[in-house]
Image (cartoon, helix red, strand yellow):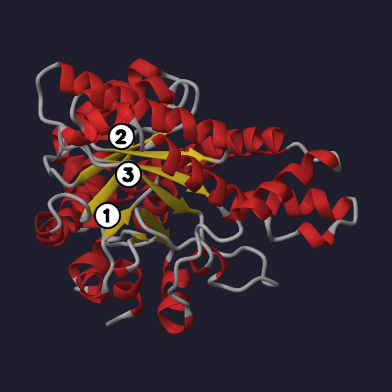
Amino acid sequence: MTPLDQLSELGQAVWFDYIRRSFTRAGDLQALIDQGVRGVTSNPAIFEKAIAGSDDYDEDIQRLAAENRSVNEIYEALAIEDIRQAADLLRPLYDRTDGRDGYVSLEVSPTLAHDTSGTVADAKRLFAATDRPNLMIKIPATPAGIPAIESVIAAGINVNVTLIFSLAQYEAAAGAYIKGLEKLLKAGRAIGQTASVASFFISRVDTAVDAALEKIGRSDLQGTTAIDNARLAYARFREIFAGDRWDRLAAAGARVQRPLWASTGTKNPAYSDTLYVDNLIGPDTVNTLPPATLKAFIDHGRASVTIDKDVAAARSRISALADIGISLETITKQLLDQGVDAFAKPFENLMRSLEEKKDRLAGSGKA
């Protein structure tokens, strides 16, 4: 049994936070699936590195440019093809687990983070264009994104709610999922194959809070907030997906919206490179790992249930932040704003790079 299989036995699925055409076509993704990877996530930054940073896509860029496709149309064609290939590799797992795992995530345009109707339209269009049942559409948990999530779930489309940093955001995301399922059920449609995860970002919280703690000399609390924050979110998950309201949906076949731990690569070299994996393991969870973190966990990670460890202490430490003048609410709001920008800028860079590649390849006649 591989380390990833051990996590699966404990109820946690590992998804791979990376996509690139040559990686998929060379069999590397299949090799990871064979080792226990159970899904794939992507984002604009990942696609920028893959498309702008390699020649894997040049032939297709030249072909699409010759068809007079716009830069945005070229990007979507390239991204959708990558997503389809990954989804097809994961389809046997999706079928075998009856839709619990085997998903690939594709994000709506980051330019729509504050546009509810635009997000809904983009999600529906991308889901139809990709034409794979094991696709999850990523929608950010912005004020405009929350009602969009409800509408997209109500349309029977799988959603990966992204850029969650706070408990308030998490509760809103979970509420949108439940409301969407209720609408779907009221419309007389089956709800058992509509899935969602709530992507709770981890390491960026520690980076921001640790900096604030360093300024006031509270090193004793450094490296604790991100894990504590996630553990409190998991406790709320257990509360939200229980009781009469949820039981009615569960009786109709609904599956819980699993918490997904994102941004789990350790940014502080003083911390263990598997810190945000080892300490967030538990039933009904997903952890999406970048390549270096996945490699580290396979090499020396520890598989045991830790997500519900010392929840009272976690609550106490989170409360202590306010007592010493650190507003976690303010920090997480700033992180959300930064997160939206962090996906918008790579997308803008990618559009510029594609424009340059389009012109260069058209001029070179490269096949």
Q: Is residue 232 above or below residue 1?
A: above
- For label 3, the SS is helix
Identify residue type, mark 2. Asn
Q: Is residue 22 visible?
A: yes
The residue that label 1 is drawn on is 364
Q: Quadrant of the N terminus?
A: bottom left
Identify which amino acid the numbered label 1 is placed on: Ser
The residue tagged 2 is 72
Q: Which residue is disc 3 drawn over?
A: 359
Dot 3 alpha-carbon crowd within 10 angstroms: few under 14, some 14 to 19, many 20 or more = some
Which residue is rendered at x = 32% and y = 44% of the image?
359
State yes or no: discs 2 and 3 in contact (Cβ < 8 Å). Answer: no
Instruction: Classify 10 Å Cα crowding around label 1: few (below 14), some (14-19), many (20 and above).
Output: few
Q: Residues within 10 Å of mark 2 (few under 14, many from 20)?
A: some
Nearer the observer, 26 or 157? 157
Look at discs 2 and 3 and give the one toward the viewer.
2
